[in-house]
Image (spheres, rainbow, N blue to C red):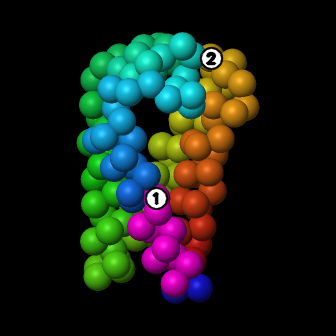
Amino acid sequence: MEILRLALQVIVALGLLNVWLLRARKPTRYRGGDAKSIREEFAAYGLPVGMMYLVGVLKVGIAIALLAGIWLPGLVVPAASLLTLLMFGACVMHLKVRDPLVKAVPALLMLIMAIAIAAL
């Protein structure tokens, strides 16, 4: 189980860093509404730009905490718990704008992995 938790930590952390640092300004088929960037996605959800920055800082911080949690295990459960809340919110936002289910799949998978990390 330890190996599974560590693998999930790395997968989730790298996924968050990829979305928020490498692909933030690039379109993907999973963006909410008709958004082509994270900024447009938050606008599609009716959220202010400040919320985008707050969520971005939190998610990058969570990614760092999950990676650091390999050596500092006390960081893992709080980081995974916060990510669970954020990803639940992301799923709700996809429902709010009536996205097709496929657009919510990455958020749903992150939610499931965050719950698993916290539980393991």
Compare marks 2 and 1 and give the one earlier in the sequence.
1
Question: Residue most toward the bottom?
Answer: 2
Residue 59 position, x and y percent, is 35, 47
Asked where in the image residue 41 lies, by quadrant, the reply is top left
Residue at image position (54%, 13%) is 34
In the rendered image, the vertical position of residue 92 relative to residue 20, given as above or below? above
The three-letter code of the residue at mark 2 reads Val
Could you tell whether 61 is left or right of 111 in the image? left
Residue at image position (63%, 56%) is 112
Task: Evaluate whether residue 82 shows in this view.
Answer: no
**Membership of 76 in magenta stretch:** no
Range of residues picked out in magenta:
3-12
Dominant secondary structure (helix, strand or loop) of the stretch shown in magenta: helix
Residue 89 position, x and y percent, is 54, 36
Work out whether residue 97 or residue 75 is closer to the camera in this orientation and state it. 97
Numbered disc 1: secondary structure: helix
Work out whether residue 82 or residue 62 is closer to the camera in this orientation and state it. 62
Label 2: few (<14), some (14–19) or many (≥20) C-alpha neighbours in 10 Å: few
In the rendered image, the vertical position of residue 6 relative to residue 56, given as above or below? below
Label placed on residue 91: none
Mark nearer the viewer, 2 or 1: 1
Residue beneath disc 1: 12
**Membership of 5 in magenta stretch:** yes
Task: Evaluate whether residue 20 shows in this view.
Answer: yes
Residue beneath disc 2: 97
Asked where in the image residue 19 lies, by quadrant, the reply is top left
Question: Residue most toward the right?
Answer: 101
In the rendered image, the vertical position of residue 55 relative to residue 116, given as above or below? above
The three-letter code of the residue at mark 1 reads Val
Q: CA distance from mark 2 to mark 1?
A: 25 Å
**Dots 2, 1 in contact, CB < 8 A:** no
In the rendered image, the vertical position of residue 69 relative to residue 106, given as above or below? below
